[in-house]
Structure formats: structure tokens, C-alpha cells
Amino acid sequence: MATEKMATGKMTATYRNPVLNADWSDPDVIRVGEDFYLTVSTFTKVPGLPILHSRDLVNWTIIGHAVTTGYADVRPGCGVWAPSLRHHDGRFWIFYGDPDVGICQVNAADPRGPWTAPHVVKPGLGLIDPCPLWDEDGQAYLVHGWAKSRAGVNNRLTLHRMAPDASMVLDEGTLVVDADLLPGYRTLEGPKLYKRDGAYWIFAPAGGVEQGWQSVFRAESIFGPYEDRIVLEQGGTDVNGPHQGGWVDSPSGEHWFMHFQDRGPYGRIVHLQPMAWVDGWPVMGDKGEPVAEAPLPVQGGAPAAPAASDDFAGPALGLQWSWQAQPDPAWWELRDGTLRLACVEGPDDLRERPAVLGQRLPGDPCTVTTSLRLTGEGRAGLTVLGYTYAWAGLERTPDGTVLVCGDMKPVPVEDGTPVTVGARIGEGALVTFLADTGEGPREIGAPFQATQGRWVGAVLGLFAEGSGTGQAIFDTFTVQRGTNP
């Protein structure tokens, strides 16, 4: 959110954190000319690796995705982990770790795509959080962390020589930071590799996403030895565990650091910290603590935010949507300004169901509504889904169509009649479902406490389930700031 303040006789726009108040996990950011680009973890969601664009580091829009395929089944916490985004030799590059496959990369001439298919640079279990660096002498390197769940070790960073075309690593790797030897360090991960004024830098968080901190490591040789310093921690603020992100400069030469904060059901929201270099080390925020607001990095930009509402006018789904696993084109259709979901077979448990179309739960209180018709056999509705879930919608029974929500008594609805279903998400992500069957909106069911998922926030989802003969027809999906229906 940007505001204006009087400074030195003129109005100066400021921003308030967070700059992305939803689950944009493990962000990395770069600048190419006057444009900023950002990508984040998406685990097994399809499409994955969204590409966001900004002109001022505060106002962002989604412009595409770098990965368009994924696993056929829902695998919470698997898939695309902590990416690094770079621009080199006229191309955009994203490196990410799939802990069950290895280190992968995709690249493109245009950040909007098309992107190459994922290529495995180094196969292996537990290889995560990779970041490349192309040095001035033509040599290329790759640093990465380790997932203890697959590799049996963590809290260490390994550096490889890499082929300049990023096709493979060229050696077995060198342990450049063993954080087991550093007092107080645990779960060192998420390294970002940079070079500045002849020195090599690794920015990496430690201590865990909820209670950790951000460190940097400096060395004269890329293989070390590295000295460390904590440069951002919660201190007296309410920004817990200021965690991994990326360093970027502005066209005017100022320095900034984007990182996430874990907010439970809201996921990992993104903050922007001013950064300065003092005595050869970066100082982030206000003397190493997160700031609530600061001057806008680039003045004069237009307000923008990632899309949330969708009128389903086509020709494609809005870029905010993703499936829980690899989608089948037969699951959905856009027609006449509506989204039509086939009532396909699958697990009754929505957490295990690939055919759930979802988007990030906003971090501010909001009201979500959509109109739904159900034709044929099945059930369909609006869900808020994490480790636990609840939903409101329509179900065809032997006695006809009914409105259902949790343990409430089903309400008969004339077959084929559109019903508005919605959810009011209040403070603390407490959800109250809503419905309007023609007599005005009213609360239905019991309040539901939204919960996070496996390293992700809760999602707002649409689904349709059945034997394949039914169809759910959704009209405009609206996300409105505030909690008025």
C-alpha cells in the first residue's frame, strides 16, 4: 500500500509492509533495466513458478508462469521449492530444487514465456534452494542447501562449478558453509549467491521460518572461507522470523531486500526492506530490524496488485488460479462468461483431490462470492482449504438439489437455479460461509478457522465432484476487501 508524505517541500510516496499480503513463498527478485521481476515457490501447484512484474518493487502484477506441468497426484510439500531468478546472456533463468528429483532449471528470452521444459542440472535427493552465479571470467557456479527429510543432513551450503550453459554441474561440490560449526545456527537454507566489488556474498536465512533470522556470508574467494553476520531479525517488531528472499537495486542505485514472514493460514507474505552498505556489510531495515514503512523505491508508479477476482470472460483462466496437481483439460471449460467444472471422480477428501482450482487466501479481511448452478449428478462449491477445510455449495440428492455447508441442515433449491455462495474471512482467518438463494445473503454453517497447509497458506478453491455426468457452472468470482457481503 502506497501513501504520500511531505518531505523537503514536496510529496514523497511511501509504502507499508507487507507489499504482497498473501502466500508468495520464498521470493526472489531481480531488476532488468527499469523492470523488476519476482518468482516464488509453488510446490505441486500447476501451473507453477509465477512470474510477477513491477516498476517500483511495491505494486506487482502476475504476467505468467515458468512451469506448466507437474505431478499427477497431490503431494503436499513436494515439487517446486525455493527458486532463484536471474538474468544472464539475454535470457531469464530460474533454478529450483525438487527434493525428490534434484536441482532443475528453466529459462526464457521473455519472462512472459515460453519457458523451456525443466532440465535437471544435478540429480539427487534432498538438493534444495539452488542459486547460480556467472562470474566475469566466464566461470559459472551453483550453490544449494540440503533437506534433511531426504538427504539426512541440513544446515550446510554446498558450492559447485557449473557448465556456463547450466546444463550440468562439473564437480562433486565443496562444503562452503557448515553451520553446525557456527554457534546458535540451525536450519541454514535458501542461499542467494552474489558478487559485489570483488567479494562473494551468500545471503541465507537460518533458525526456521517462524523464529529465524537473515544472515549474510562474505568471502574473497567463492570457495571461502566465509565470515558471517546476522543482518535482519525480528527484534522489537511483530515481523516474526524475517526469512529468505533476494537483494536488488533500483535504477537510482538504492538497495533493497525482499523477504517473507510466515503468517500461518495466510502463508508466507512478502516484506520490502531498505538496505544500505556500511563498512562493507549490508544493513537491512532499521538497524537490522524490519520496517513498517519507507519511501517508495521508485516514485510515480501506478497502483497494482496480483489479480484475485475473475469474470471468466476468457480466453483463459486468470493467472492467479492453479490446480492442486496436473490438470486434465476435460475438467474445465470457459463459456459465455462462466467457468464450467465437470463433476469428475476423485478422492472425497478435497486435500487429496487434484481437481480443485485454487488461489491464495488474501492476508487482509475480505469477502468472496460466486454464483453457482449444478446440473446433473454431483456436488460442487467454494472451499477454504489447508491442513483442514470446509466448503459451502450445492449437492444433488435423490430428493433434488440442496444447499449444504458442514453440519447445517440441507436447504432445498430448485434444480438448475443459481445460488450465490461466499465466504467472509475475518481477522485471524476465521471463515463464515454465506449463501443467497434469492432472499438476500445470510450466514450458513458454523464458523471455520482456516489453517495453513504443508509450507503454504490456505487457499480459496472451487471444485466439482461426481461420476462425470454433472457440471457446476460458476459465474463471476469476486474478492472484495472487507467483510461486508
Image (tube, helix red, strand yellow):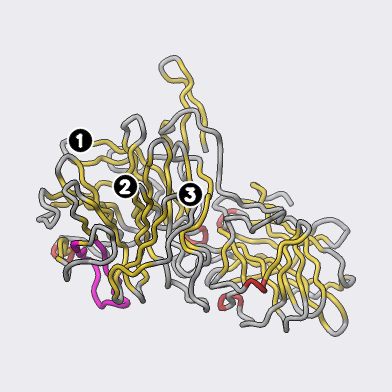
**Residue 107 left/right relative to 425:** left
Check disc 1 and report the residue beneath it: 278
Q: Which residue occupies the foreground of this view, 83 or 451?
A: 83
Q: Could you say which quadrant of the image residue 31 lies in?
A: top left
| Residue farthest toward the right in the current orientation of the protein | 414
Q: Which residue occupies the foreground of this view, 126 or 208?
A: 126
In whole angstroms, how far apart are the C-alphas of marks 3 and 2? 30 Å
Disc on the earlier residue, 1 or 2:
2
Q: Which residue occupies the foreground of this view, 338 or 90?
A: 90
Indicate the position of residue 422 as horizontal and vertical percent values: 72, 60
Q: Residues within 10 Å of mark 2 (few under 14, many from 20)?
A: few
- Bounds of the magenta span? 143-161
For the point 42% across and 42% down, which residue is it? 36
| Above or below 22: residue 248 | above
Indicate the position of residue 135 as horizontal and vertical percent values: 20, 49
Q: Which mark is residue 235?
A: 2
For the point 49% across and 71% down, which residue is it? 70
Q: Amino acid at mark 3?
A: Leu
Check disc 3 and report the residue beneath it: 52
Q: Is residue 358 magenta?
A: no
Callout 1 secondary element: strand
Callout 2 secondary element: loop
Disc on the earlier residue, 3 or 2:
3
| Residue farthest toward the top in the current orientation of the protein | 9
Single out the mark in the foreground, 1 or 2. Answer: 1
Q: Amino acid at mark 1?
A: Val
For the point 25% across and 70% down, which residue is it? 154
